[in-house]
Amino acid sequence: MAKIANEEVAEVVAPKPVSKPKATSGLFASLSDTDEYLNVLLFGREGSGKTTAACSLANLGYGKVLVVNAEAGMKKNTLKRHGVDIDRIMVWPPAGESITHAGLDEVHRQIKSDLADDPKSWAGVVFDSATEIVQALVDYVAGDRIDKATRKGVTIDGIDQFFTDRSDYGTMSKMFRDILRKFRDLPTHFVVTALERRDVDEDSGKVQYGPAVTPGVQTDLLGYVDLVLACSAADDSEGKPYRALTRSSGKYRGKDRLGVLPKVLVNPTIERILAYESGKLTEETDPLQKQLINTPKENDA
């Protein structure tokens, strides 16, 4: 994966401090007076650069970045080698603590309070990854159900303690939807990573690749974000750079609500996405996009 920082996008303008938008009454706000932030989903196979791209939020030059480190896979030296300012990265949960809805809700309230006091206190939040957060919440819900049954005198054998009931997934989906909406609506950037999953439509047999979460959570996740990027690692043998498909194509899910990204974006860091969003970069002026000259753009995730 290429280093994140480069001269063309070294400076990304920080968002203006959040202020009450002008309005003709207390009920309405002018769209031109509101501040906008990125809500991004990066999905792909293991080792496809999702975490590093997400953590490039730390290079915006202001505020901290919270990483919900569900995969426990961040390596500080690796991030440093790729040009990430690790001094701005804060990690949760602490070692040895589990991820729960209550814990995530407490984190949300703290960041919301910090941003109310200082709009530049946090540059963004990263969920790394939704795949692991969903599983952690399912385990929490199933464990709580088993504990309640045990307290009622129900005997739980060695196999039953690992059983996940259908209702556990329904409860988890509601929890994740609540947390996802709360973090998405914070006045700061929000990035979610997820592993890749292959789905096959039972009726048509059509194959499609998307984020590896349960179907209900996948629908919420794809709908709540502005950008869905299917990430692929560099392949030196085929001359393909680290890249991401930004719109649905063939078997891969994608979305670009901003309408400014190339269909295939080389080195899809948050820095570079913001440079495209602000107009600092276009596909024609972006030198890294030249790496795709001999690479097919269709179905290139």
Image (cartoon, rainbow, N blue to C red):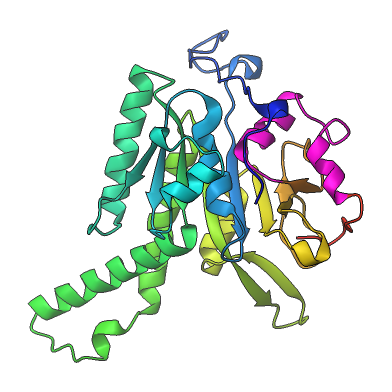
| Residue depicted at x 33% and y 25% | 114
- In this orientation, which residue lies closer to the viewer: 33 or 81? 81
Residue 244 lies in the magenta stretch? no
Residue 189 visible in the picture: no
Q: Nearer the viewer, residue 269 or 137?
A: 269
The answer to whether residue 147 is above or below residue 223 is below
Tell me: residue 276, above or below residue 219.
Answer: above
Callout count = 0
Relative to 280, 223 lies left or right: left
Indicate the quadrant where residue 118 lies: top left
Horizontally, residue 196 falls left or right of residue 189, namely right
Quadrant containing the C terminus in the rendered view: bottom right
In-front residue for pair 212/268: 268
> Residue 213: x and y, percent?
52, 66
Task: Give the residue drawn at x 74%, y 31%.
Answer: 276
* Residue that appears at 41% across and 32% down: 88
Q: Give the left or right position of residue 142, taking residue 9 as reference.
A: left
Q: Residue furthest right?
A: 294
Q: Position of residue 76 (x, y in %)?
A: 42, 47
Q: Does residue 99 appear left or right of residue 56 in this picture? A: left
119 or 34, nearer to the observer: 119
Where does the image place residue 245, in percent across and percent down from the top left? 75, 53
- Percent x, y of residue 232: 69, 59
Give, as a single range, the part of the protein colored magenta: 267-292
| Magenta stretch: includes residue 286 | yes
From where the camera sits, is residue 80 visible? yes
Occupied quadrant, residue 219: bottom right
